[in-house]
């Protein structure tokens, strides 16, 4: 049985003030194995991980270049006599945030050893200490801020082992604009990039422009909406329109438009076919509409990504 969210947050808050090492200190690159130009980083604490952000992943890695992106992953954990070293209000004017998150039945604390720049790759070396639990589940973050720079990637080396390299492309190589671009969050790497829609209004649009390079091998849209009566992906003069009916058994509809003409009819063998999966708060497939914390998951067809640098997304949860 999973521990209730409020209990998990309470246990995490306690851990944040007792176990996170080197809080607020600038770290020099003098640890064993460190090489390259040293980068001064600061460790921050006093935050919990949102239970809507990759809740089923045992580990997550984050690069946040603005406050909106940070706030979609982390929340402020307030306690009595709070002396946590949190981010400055205007931190993203001069700095970025990188983070590693462990989830599971263990309280994980971190000790940062070094931060170095190898070419355009930022290398973060740290160690972890785990205290297993028989029942409680935790989401334990390591949150670092560092000066903005020409970083192409961040490599996380945990306990002497390289466990993840995250390209900065999801934070820097996509320009997002439109009516409410803040509703769209970008995470991932060159293999898999996820655009997450978190829109309290339920109706919006955003245009995604790829600045350079190639589209990732998989481009996923997670629409964290309670309904999806209209969703469209526009690539040039081609538009793929989808709908999950809020009635009639939540039937799914899919239409392809070229210019002002509809067609051809799509089948599962079509290059523009798109599966729409409904997931619950634990990211498990379910029938019907998603409950609170759930989402609609869609993998953008490669046919829409070919020979284009720009996509437009439109969404409507329920027609008013």
Image: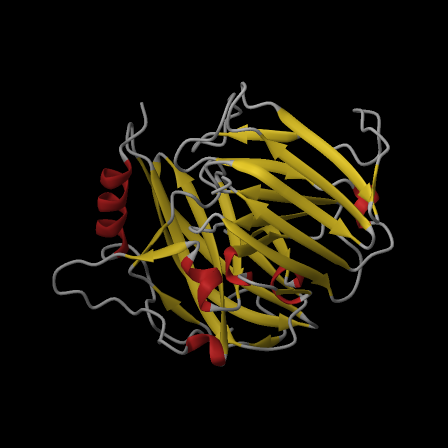
Residue at figure coordinates x 42%, y 43% from the top left: 52
Image quadrant where one finds the N terminus: top left
Q: What is the count of numbered marks? A: 0
Residue 240 in percent (x, y) is at 74, 41
| Depth order, front residue of 294/248 | 248
Which residue, as the protein is rendered here, is positioned at the far top? 249
In this orientation, does residue 160 appear? no
Residue 112 in percent (x, y) is at 43, 63
Residue at figure coordinates x 23%, y 44% from the top left: 11
Residue 247 in percent (x, y) is at 51, 24
The relative height of residue 298 versus residue 114 in the rendered view (above or below) is above
Residue at figure coordinates x 68%, y 67% from the top left: 152
The relative height of residue 110 versus residue 296 in the rendered view (above or below) is below
Which residue, as the protein is rendered here, is positioned at the far bottom? 94
Residue 120: quadrant of the picture: bottom right
Is 170 situated left or right of 250 in this image? right
Residue 178 in percent (x, y) is at 60, 64
Residue at figure coordinates x 48%, y 38% from the top left: 58
In this orientation, does residue 298 appear? yes
| Depth order, front residue of 37/240 | 240
Is 33 situated left or right of 190 in this image? left
Is 83 situated left or right of 228 in this image? left
């Amino acid at each position: 049985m999973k521990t209730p969210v409020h209990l998990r947050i309470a246990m995490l808050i306690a851990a944040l003030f007792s176990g996170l090492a080197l809080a607020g200190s600038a770290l020099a690159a003098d640890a064993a194995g460190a090489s390259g130009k040293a980068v001064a980083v600061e460790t921050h604490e006093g935050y919990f991980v949102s239970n809507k952000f990759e809740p089923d992943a045992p580990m997550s890695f984050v690069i946040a270049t603005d406050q909106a992106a940070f706030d979609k992953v982390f929340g402020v954990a307030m306690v009595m006599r709070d002396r946590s070293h949190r981010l400055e209000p205007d931190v993203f004017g001069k700095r970025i945030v990188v983070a590693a998150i462990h989830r599971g039945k263990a309280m994980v604390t971190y000790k940062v050893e070094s931060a170095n720049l190898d070419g355009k790759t930022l290398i973060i070396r740290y160690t972890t200490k785990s205290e297993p639990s028989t029942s409680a589940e935790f989401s334990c973050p390591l949150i670092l801020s560092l000066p903005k720079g020409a970083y192409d990637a961040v490599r996380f080396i945990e306990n002497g082992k390289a466990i993840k390299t995250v390209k900065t492309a999801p934070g820097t190589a996509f320009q997002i604009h439109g009516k409410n671009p803040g509703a769209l969050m970008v995470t991932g790497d060159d293999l898999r990039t996820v655009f997450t829609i978190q829109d309290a209004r339920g109706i919006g649009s955003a245009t995604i422009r790829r600045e350079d390079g190639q589209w990732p091998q998989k481009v996923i849209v997670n629409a964290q909406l309670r309904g999806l009566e209209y969703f469209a992906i526009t690539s040039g003069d081609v538009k793929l329109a989808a709908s999950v009916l809020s009635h009639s058994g939540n039937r799914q509809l899919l239409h392809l438009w070229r210019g002002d003409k509809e067609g051809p009819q799509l089948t599962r063998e079509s290059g523009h076919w798109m599966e729409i999966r409904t997931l619950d708060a634990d990211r498990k497939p379910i029938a019907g509409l998603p409950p609170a914390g759930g989402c609609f998951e869609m993998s953008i067809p490669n046919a829409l990504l070919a020979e284009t640098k720009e996509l437009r997304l439109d969404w409507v949860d329920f027609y008013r």
